[in-house]
Each structure stands twice: as C-alpha cells, then as structure tokens.
Image: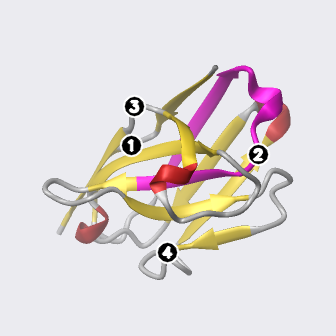
C-alpha cells in the first residue's frame, strides 16, 4: 500500500503562482511514474502532468504546457507541481497518483494509488 497526501492548494488571483506537493509513504520503493490530475465541479477528472521514475521524462496537458512544471525528489518521497500564470480555468481539486506502469499515461484508470486532493481556486 502507498499513501499519498497533497498540500499547497489555496485561493489566489489570476496570474499568481502556487506549488503543490505530494508526500508518499508506505511501500514507496515500487513507485514508478507519477502524475497530477485535476477535477473541476461537474467535470471529469483530467490529466495535468506526469513524470517518470527517474524524473528525466515528463508529459503535460496542452492546457498547462509552458505554465506548469512537474518534478519529483525520490530521496524525499515527494512529488511537486509548480504552477505559474494561473488562470480561473485552472480552478479544481488537484490529485496526485502513482502509475501502474512506467509509461507516462494520461488515463486515470492506469493509476492505482491516489491522494485525497487539494483545492486550488483562482479568482479573476
């Protein structure tokens, strides 16, 4: 079992920055790729970004490319999402998750362990 706890969300104005963190505990040695997803009210959960086990490969949704950066520090068992130039449409609950396999999948069903999420609200 792996436990994931997100933090760093909040209410900020458009154009501001936030950094989300995801702390992993439990059986973390088996963690492969990891990702961030988000879910806005009334919408399906959507892919935001993913990073490989080593951190050398990343993937981003087109909507966040160039504004968000995903990183991980394995020694700290922590995943990060740096979010810059935030927009009101970025408002959502953000979740971190561990991938079932090594590929940088964009599909939620290919992730097995999930955190409870952290709320990000961007005002215009």
Q: Distance between the residues labelled 1 and 4?
A: 19 Å
Q: Which mark is residue 116?
A: 3
Which quarter of the figure is the N terminus placed in? top right
Above or below, 47 relative to 30: below
Which quarter of the figure is the C terminus placed in? bottom left
The quarter holding residue 98 reads: top right
In primary-sequence order, the first of circles 4 and 3 is 4
- What's the magenta region? 19-37
Which callout, 2 or 1, points to the residue nearer the camera?
2
Residue 97 placement (x, y as % from top left): 55, 43
Above or below, 6 relative to 18: above
Can you identify the residue that label 4 sits on?
61
In primary-sequence order, the first of circles 1 and 3 is 1
Can you identify the residue that label 1 sits on?
9
Q: How far apart are marks 2 and 1 (CA)?
A: 24 Å
Q: Are marks 2 and 1 in contact (CB under 8 Å)?
A: no
Residue 64 placement (x, y as % from top left): 47, 75
Which callout, 1 or 3, points to the residue nearer the camera?
3
Q: Residue at x 70, y 55 (%)?
A: 71
Q: Are marks 4 and 3 in contact (CB under 8 Å)?
A: no
Q: Residue at x 84, y 64 (%)?
A: 56
In primary-sequence order, the first of circles 1 and 4 is 1
Which callout, 4 or 2, points to the residue nearer the camera?
2
Q: Which residue is drawn at 45% across and 60% down?
A: 17
Q: Residue 32 carries which label?
A: 2
Which callout, 3 or 2, points to the residue nearer the camera?
2
């Amino acid at each position: 079992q792996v436990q994931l706890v997100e933090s760093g969300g909040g209410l900020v104005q458009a154009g501001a920055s936030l950094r989300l963190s995801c702390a992993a505990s439990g059986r973390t040695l088996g963690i492969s790729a990891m990702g961030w997803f988000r879910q806005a009210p009334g919408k399906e959960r959507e892919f935001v970004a993913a990073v490989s086990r080593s951190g050398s490969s990343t993937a981003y949704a087109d909507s966040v490319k160039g504004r968000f950066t995903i990183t991980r520090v394995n020694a700290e068992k922590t995943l990060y999402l740096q979010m810059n130039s935030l927009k009101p449409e970025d408002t959502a609950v953000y979740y971190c998750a561990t991938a079932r396999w090594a590929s940088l999948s964009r599909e939620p069903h290919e992730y097995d362990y999930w955190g409870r999420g952290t709320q990000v609200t961007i005002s215009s």
